[in-house]
Amino acid sequence: MTEIKFTRDNGQITALWSEVFGDSIEEIEFFLKNCKHKSCLALFNSGEIQSMLFLVDCSYCGFSGKYVYAVCTRKTSRNNGYASSLVEEAKKYMGDFLWLIPANDNLFNYYSRLGFTVKLYSEGKYNEKIIFDEDKDIIEYLYEGSEYDCPKGMIYSKVKLPNGGTGFKFNEER
């Protein structure tokens, strides 16, 4: 039986995250212990997590939303639409918008099919920035999964938001 729900099962979260992304247990535990405003939405099949994503609270231009982070699916469960189902479910909890940074070029097309558009850019200095109520180390952690020096963001929004930036640029002093 397939079920989508929020979970705090750090054992299953850590196992899937490690399998998909190859991060060490210490790196994963750092995020789980130190990211204050997050929730894990997961798709379970027979009680085991098959796919998951994190929703991290953020704001932009006075609007509240969620940053979609660490979207992943167990290798043996891919191509079943699990991650897409999770993103669709996440839209119910997004507030005004969902925002994410695709890790590579292939994911821009994937998220476009789910209604996301390239909207927010991080390659420059902008007055409008994505704001996280997290420690600096966690904010840096949230951007590490991208292959880009200056990652582009994608947004799914109920409201019209101006172009802007994350306020973060790799290899730049903050």
Image (cartoon, rainbow, N blue to C red):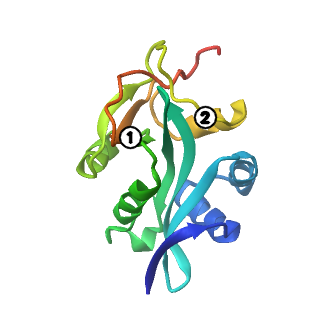
Amino acid type shown at disc 1 = Asn
* Mark seen at residue 50: none
Residue 158: x %, y % from top left: 33, 42
* Mark seen at residue 132: 2
Q: What residue is rendered at 60% in x and 56% in y?
A: 39
Disc 2, SS: loop
Q: What residue is rendered at 45% in x and 50% in y?
A: 94
Q: What residue is rendered at 33% in x and 46% in y?
A: 107
Residue 96: x %, y % from top left: 42, 42
Quarter of the image for the N terminus: give it: bottom left
Q: Nearer the viewer, residue 3 or 147?
A: 3
Disc 1, SS: loop
Which tag is nearer the camera, tag 1 or tag 2?
2
Q: CA distance from mark 1 to mark 2?
A: 23 Å
Residue 127: x %, y % from top left: 49, 14
Q: Is residue 61 above or below residue 67?
A: above
Horizontal relation, residue 118 to residue 136: left or right: left
Q: Is residue 44 above or below residue 46?
A: above
* Mark seen at residue 104: 1
Horizontal relation, residue 102 to residue 53: left or right: left
Kindly tell me whether residue 162 is visible in this rendering.
Answer: yes
Q: Residues within 10 Å of mark 2 (few under 14, many from 20)?
A: some
Amino acid type shown at disc 2 = Phe
Q: Does label 1 or label 2 sit earlier along the sequence?
A: 1
Q: Is residue 134 above or below residue 14?
A: above
The answer to which quarter of the image holds residue 98 is top left
Quarter of the image for the C terminus: give it: top right
Q: Residues within 10 Å of mark 1 (few under 14, many from 20)?
A: few
Residue 7: x %, y % from top left: 61, 68
